[in-house]
Amino acid sequence: MSLRPENHLDGISLLAAFCLALAAPFARAEGPQPIIVEAESGKRTGVDIGKQGQGFTGTGYVTGFDADGDALELSAQAPAPGIYDLSIRYRCAFGQKGFDLRVNGIGSSGILPATGEQFALHRVGRVELAAGSNTIVVAKGWGFYDVDRVELTPSRARGAPQPPPVQAVNPRADDASRDLLARLASGYGRTTLYGLYSEADANYLLEHTGRRPAIMGTDLMDASPSRVERGARCEAVRQAIEAHRRGQIVTVSWHWNAPTDLLDGQMVEHEGKRVEAKWWSGFYTFATSFDLAAALADPAGERHRLIIRDIDAIAKELAELRDAGVPVLWRPLHEAEGGWFWWGAKGPAPFKKLWRLLYERLAVHHGLDNLLWVYSSGTDPAWYPGDDVVDIVGIDAYPADIRDSLDATWETLLEQYGSRKLLALTEFGGTPDMPRMHDFGVWWSFAVSWSDREGPRKNDVARLKQIIADGAVGTLPPP
C-alpha cells in the first residue's frame, strides 16, 4: 500500500502506534514488582524508629540493634507460594556487620557490607514464602546497623549446576583418584553424597535410617609430631582403610598441632576469657605462639625445618593409604580464613605459601598420587591458593538453623569457582537438609556432617529419616 503525501504523517503515526503495541508486552516484561515492607511498619523488640539523615524511604528506618534479643518482625504478603529473592535496604556506618534472619521460622545469617552514612540495597539470598502472610525477623547478629525496608521478588528457577571440566591437578594422579573425581563429576547436580566423621555417628545413622554414609572421614591430628612426642597415637590410617574396604569414599583432614611453641599450661586470652592452654589444643591460634609468616620467611631456620618434619611425618601416613589403593579427599589447612587455627592467623599470603609448600612436598617430593586436594577456607577469594593446586572447593558451615539452605554461600562459591571446580560442603553442624537445598538449586557434590552434638543427632529423627530416604541423597545400604 502506498501513502499519499497528505496522509504521510497519519501513516507514520499509525506505524508508530502499531510498533508501540507490539513492544508494550515486552516493555512490561521487566519482571514482577517487588513486595516492599517498610521496616517502621513492623513489630519491634529493643529497637526504635529513626529519622536521622537522608536517603531512607517511607517515614523512617529501624535502628538500635545493639543488644542480644533485639529484633524486627515484619509481615510480608505473597501472592503465590514459591522461592523469592530477599534484599534488605540498610545502612552500616561502622564497617560490615553480621545479621540473623528468620523467614517463617527458618533461620539463616549473613553479612551486610559497610555503606558509610548512605542507605544501600543488599541481596541476602533466596527464601521460601507461602501464599498469603509470611513472617520475616531480622535479629541483631553483630548489631549496629539500620534497616530501612525489606524487598522480595519471585526468584528465577536455578537449574542444577553443570559439572565443570575436571582433571586432577596432580598430573601423576593415580587411576583410583582420577576415577573418584570422575565419579563425583558424573553425579554433580543430580546427587549429593552424604558423609560422616565418626563411626559412632555412622552407627547412629544406620540404627535410625537403615543406611550408611557414602563418605567416611578421619583426621591425622594425632600424627602431628608435637602430639606424638607427648604420647598420642593415630588410628586414622586404619580407620580409612577399613572404610575403603566397606566401599566408602575416604576424606582425611589434618588438625595440625603446631610444630613447636605450644603454650601448654599458660593462661591466655580466648574468646574474651582467660583460659589455660593445653598442648592438645595446639592447632588453635590461642594455644601456640608459632609464627607461620616468620617461619616461612626463613627457609634455613629451625621452625621451617620443623614444618617440613611435620609434613614428612604426615606423608608416611598418607603413603600407607596410597599403598593400600585408597584414594583420598585430602582436606588440609581448613577454615584458614577464620584465623582461629594457626595456619590462618597471619593472613592469606603465608597461608597460600604453606598450601603450596604442602602440595610440593606431598604430591611431588613424596609422590602421593592418591590425593584429591580439597580447599575449604571460606568465601574470600584472597585466600584461594590457585586452580593448579586445588581439585575441589569446599565450605564449612555451622548455621544457627540446620534447615538453612546455604543459598547465598552456594551462589557466592558458584560465581567464584563453579565454572572450574566442583563444590562441596566439607563440614556441617548437623545433617544438612539436602532435599531442601536441592529445591533451592543448591547441589553440593558431597556433604559431610561433623560429629557428636554437631552430627546427625542434632536433627529431629523424623526429618533425618526423610532426608536420608530422598533419592538425590547418596548413601549406602546396610552391610
Image (cartoon, grey):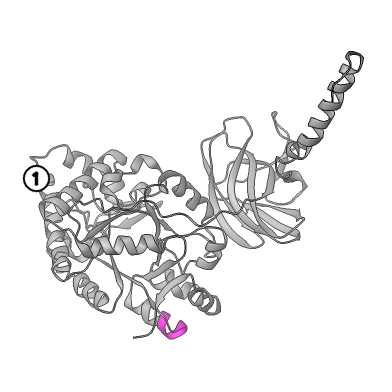
Q: Is residue 246 left or right of residue 230?
A: right
Image: 138 above or below 216: above
Q: Report the front residue among 260 and 17.
A: 17
Q: Is residue 378 left or right of residue 12?
A: left
Q: Position of residue 240 (x, y in %)?
A: 24, 72
Residue at image position (71%, 60%) is 81
**What secondary structure predominates along the stretch shown in magenta?**
helix
Crowding around mark 1 (Cα neighbors within 10 Å: few <14, some 14 to 19, many 20+) is few
- Classify the position of the C terminus by image quarter: bottom left
Image: 352 above or below 217: above
Residue at image position (16%, 54%) is 362
Q: Quadrant of residue 118?
A: top right
| Residue closest to the far front | 1
- Classify the position of the N terminus by image quarter: top right
Residue at image position (82%, 35%) is 21
Q: Position of residue 458 (x, y in %)?
A: 48, 72
Q: Position of residue 224 (x, y in %)?
A: 17, 61
Residue 394 magenta: no
Q: Position of residue 14 (x, y in %)?
A: 86, 26
Residue 47 seen: no
Range of the magenta residues? 205-210
Q: Report the front residue among 320 and 110.
A: 320
Residue indicated by mark 1: 302
Q: Is residue 220 left or right of residue 24?
A: left
